[in-house]
Amino acid sequence: MRKRFKYIFRAYRYRNKVDPSEINYIRENLKEGSVAVDIGAHKGGYLYWMQKSVKATGKVFAFEPQVKLYNYLKNIAASLKFKNVSIENLGMSSEEGEVIFYIPISKNGISIGARIDQFNNGTQCEESKIQITTLDKYFFDRQIYPDLIKIDVEGHEQQVLLGGMNLLKSCKPKIVMECENRHLSETSMSDVFDTLFELDYCGYFFENNELKPVKEFNAEIHQDLVKGRWGKKKKYINNFIFEVPPRN
């Protein structure tokens, strides 16, 4: 009972405080019967609202490579009887296989900063082998066409997108994606965004609950770690919306 309460409390905290604009966007764009994908589900803050939005006739596919978090989500989903949720202990990338997963050392062995790409800032990590798949292999090849995909992969965004080009071209799902300069080493935010622009996507971000075009985003201003993420005002923007506008 206590774990269920904590989980639901966390979900409402995401909706009301952590990512209110993004959660509202998801709730507005997922309807009964929709298919949603949560890549990097972590503790399920987004997952709760996805499954609630698509209802019994819809489906949510959640991917979480950290074993402890995967087991936690499986137990929560069973406890709350989420019959419309499928949880996979997999990472997403540009190809299938096995890779080293880097988990920053913490007391409980769980980290919000765990990633496939190796850290280059001296962060001490535990290493574990994980299985990875691609959006195309898991969804396109099985003729499953998501309406919305949420991506939170700590700098591995480009590889996730490249592994799903056929899927993105075919069904053009809406995308809610975290992307930060500080997580990227071999690519840039512009590279990630350009991958989607080439598929006719338009990009946006929320600032003060207002949806603005991504051309107004300035990393020096909107991702200032000192003034933004850890400053008093905490105006730090790292979530982006991408969607293909309807044709006239």
Image: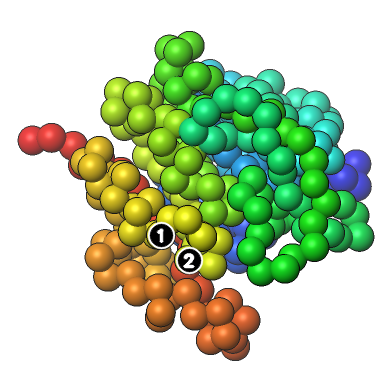
Q: Where is residue 50? Give x, y as percent.
A: 56, 37
Q: Residue at x 53, y 20 (%)?
A: 138
- Element on which disc 1 rests: loop
Residue 196 placement, left or right of 113 = left
Foreground: 117 or 30?
Answer: 117
- Residue linked to disc 1: 188
Question: Quadrant of residue 182 in the image?
Answer: bottom right
Residue that protrudes farthest toward the left in the picture: 248
Amino acid under label 2? Answer: Asn
- Residue linked to disc 2: 181
Q: Where is residue 78? Give x, y as percent.
A: 80, 26
Residue that protrudes farthest toward the top in the picture: 142
Amino acid under label 1? Answer: Ser
Q: Residue at x 72, y 68 (%)?
A: 122
- Element on which disc 2 rests: helix
Q: Residue at x 48, y 27 (%)?
A: 135
Image height check: is 205 above or below 177? below
Image height check: is 214 above or below 164? below
